[in-house]
Image (spheres, rainbow, N blue to C red):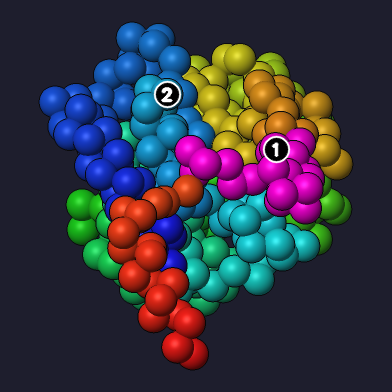
Amino acid sequence: MLALRTSQARFVRSFQRYSHTVTNAKKITLPKLHEMAQNSQKIAMLTAHDSLSARMAEEAGVDIVLVGDSLAMVSMGFPDTSQITLDEMIYHCKAVKRGCQTPFIIGDLPFGSYEQSVEKGVESTVRMIKEGGADCVKFEGGRELAPMVERLSQYGIATMPHIGLTPQRQVATGGFKVQGRKAESAFRLLEDALVLESAGAQLFLLEGVPTEIGEVISSKVKIPVIGIGAGAGTSGQVLVQLDMLGGFDDFKPKFLKRYADLLGYSTSAMKQYVQEVRQNEFPQREHSYSMKEEEFIKFTKLAERV
């Protein structure tokens, strides 16, 4: 337990030193994101699910950190995103908030926390902002959510509607399939975007649409559009952090680029640890604590009495 507490203390000290180094950096704000989009400066967004993943994203220079309901699958082991609760999302959002200072933080409203009514959506949003510490909330849906967007906008709360491929509705849309491949369905997505922007939306997340549609929608609205599987014509990009780090070897969608082999590297390191423990190669002397010889002699004499 002493070793564990010592390790924890070192982590805290390291984290405090790191936190001190970023205090001079300016917090990314909504006006800043709008300015970046207007100046054609691409916005980099990643998900995070705890303080460490948030810290890494911040150190990498990410503009937006999304506490997405995808953590239900990549962090909690659920088969889809529909089973995570608002309380659990708030818990993770609070952890992310503690881990980073400068990125704009967006909290995802999970399935079942906003669909029932505008009042329910407002209540869930206020909790995500007040308890979770989010700067903005994201939720899936089109023009049917315009009344909720308008109400939240009146309260000065920033929203990010998620249109296109919406995982929470994947059963109704026929699974995880690209949306907007037909002219009529693509035009409906554009109409959704325009209606939601008019209602007061401040950002969009556009997922799983043809590149051409992503570019057109981004050009027709005046607010930043962050894409995932929506081509290079959007205002910025988002990926799930554990996906782009290579945390899974069985998830290979076309839009994903792996920048590392986290699963392979981590598993290899753990295998080496297991082997060294079993062969008594770890810990070595440099990993162990010692005591003065005279104190050890006293101890052995005391130990002989029992």
The residue tagged 2 is 60
In the rendered view, tell whether residue 122 sits above or below residue 65.
below
Tell me the residue at 25%/44% (across/down): 13
Q: Within the magenta stretch, is there residue 133?
A: no
Q: Position of residue 8 (x, y in %)?
A: 37, 55
Q: Is residue 122 visible?
A: no
Q: Position of residue 251 (x, y in %)?
A: 81, 40
Badge 2: residue crowd in 10 Å (few <14, some 14–19, many ≥20): few
Disc on the earlier residue, 1 or 2: 2
**Mark 1 vs mark 2: in front:** 1
The residue tagged 1 is 269
In the rendered image, the quadrant that contains the N terminus is bottom left
Q: Is residue 133 visible?
A: yes
- Between residue 295 and residue 211, name the one nearer to us: 295
- Between residue 26 and residue 268, name the one nearer to us: 268
- The amino acid sitting under disc 2 is Ala
In the rendered view, tell whether residue 45 sits above or below residue 74.
above
Q: Position of residue 213 (x, y in %)?
A: 66, 23
